Amino acid sequence: MAIQVHLDELLKDRGMTAKELCKWVGITEANLSILRSGKAKGIRFGTVNKICFYLQCDVGDILKFDGQLEVDEDA
Amino acid sequence: MNRKTLMKLSVLAVCSALVFLLTSGNGGSVLVLTAMPFTFLGKGLRVLSLSGPAGNIAAIVIYVTVCLLPLVLILRKKKDKEDWLLVLGSAMLFYVLYLMINPGLMLNGMSSDVGSAILCGTVVSVFVSWGILKLLHKGETMEISSGYHALRVLLGACAALYIVAGFGIGTGELKAEIEAVRTGNTMPGQNLLDTYIFLFFIYAVQVMEYTLDACLMILGIELTKELEQNPYSESCVMAAGKMSKKAQGYLTVILLSNMVLNIAQVLAASRLYNIDAMVRIPVFSVALCLCSMALTRLLGQGKDIKEENDLYI
């Protein structure tokens, strides 16, 4: 994935468990697992907003671009 | 189809076949059966009316009340456009019931049992049309679970009607046709066996067509249960696929048997004393098959879209 999700580090820094984050954000643990593993196709603005709010971080802290162009298989 | 449903359909098939076989019934007798409540009510009101002045007043009150009953639904605050059909129904009830009470006033050609059955059938058709239009209208705003429930009832009723039409009316008509061939061909040396066999062949094909379509409707009922639980689930798509596969198989059997029937009739025409002038094309079965195929594809696409959508967190 050209866009990498850095949730694990953020959770560790904030001392919060994945379960707690799910509870605050209102998503299932299965969905959070999809997001953390990089298998998610997209993330809604609402979800990013809640994650940033509860983890007190910026969007760029969660999602990082690795400089590569990824070809969309479905396109 | 589970064993319980199969049992119910079998019992219905045997009972309807027996009823139509023992009562010499056919399609026309279904119409007479539809008219029965009206003819009974008409006769009853006539007897009541002739019993004396008090009886006459009671008969008039009952007559007016019964004819005005449909209008009660129009008096409700919330009316739909189709409810105005009830005004027509009420007016027709006044006319038809009056004729049932006074059969002497009926026009020539309408005085027989079938004539009065046609009159009453017309009234019933107005109320049935109102009911169907109402269902269509309510269907737009109906809750999903109620919609599936209504669909199940409708499919079940259609399947039962198809079984009665195939085994009941079909058996009655077979009996009537055999009787007509027997009584109309009394010359010595006439071999009617081929005609009887052919009549039974037509009957078997018709019964099979009705039965297979009824089975498809039962599968439709099972599919609605899956749709109600989760329309995007694998089991739902599989149930739709199963229905679609069966629909294709059934249609193939129906089309081939109808084709064989048409060809056999042409080949054996010289030996038959009864020719069926209809060339059979099972339009309803074709429509049912195409609908189930389209539904399967649609559900499959819906499942894929749902799975993709689930990857958007």
Image: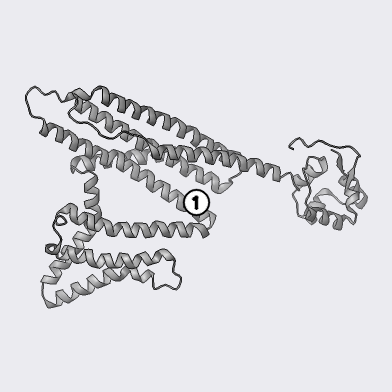
Is residue B2 visible to the viewer in this orientation of the structure?
A: no
Is residue B256 visible to the viewer in this orientation of the structure?
A: yes
Disc 1 target residue: B148
Residue B250, located in which quarter of the rendered image?
top left
Residue B259, located in which quarter of the rendered image?
top left
The local crowd at label 1, few if under 14, some if 14 to 19, many if 20 or more residues have their Cα within 10 Å, is some
Closer-to-camera residue (A7/B170): B170
- The reply, left or right, for residue B173 in relation to residue A12 is left
B1 relative to B148, above or below:
above
Picture coordinates of residue A60, whole percent (x, y): 90, 50
Number of numbered discs visible in the structure rendering:
1
Residue B129, located in which quarter of the rendered image?
bottom left
Residue found farthest to the left: B188
Picture coordinates of residue B145, whole percent (x, y): 52, 54
Q: Residue at x 53, y 41 (%)?
A: B295
Which amino acid, mark 1? Tyr
Q: Secondary structure at mark 1?
A: helix
Residue found farthest to the right: A13
Closer-to-camera residue (B92/B296): B92
Q: Residue at x 25, y 34 (%)?
A: B277
- Image quadrant where one finds the N terminus of chain B: top left
- Tell me which chain the residue with mark 1 is part of: B
Picture coordinates of residue A68, whole percent (x, y): 89, 37
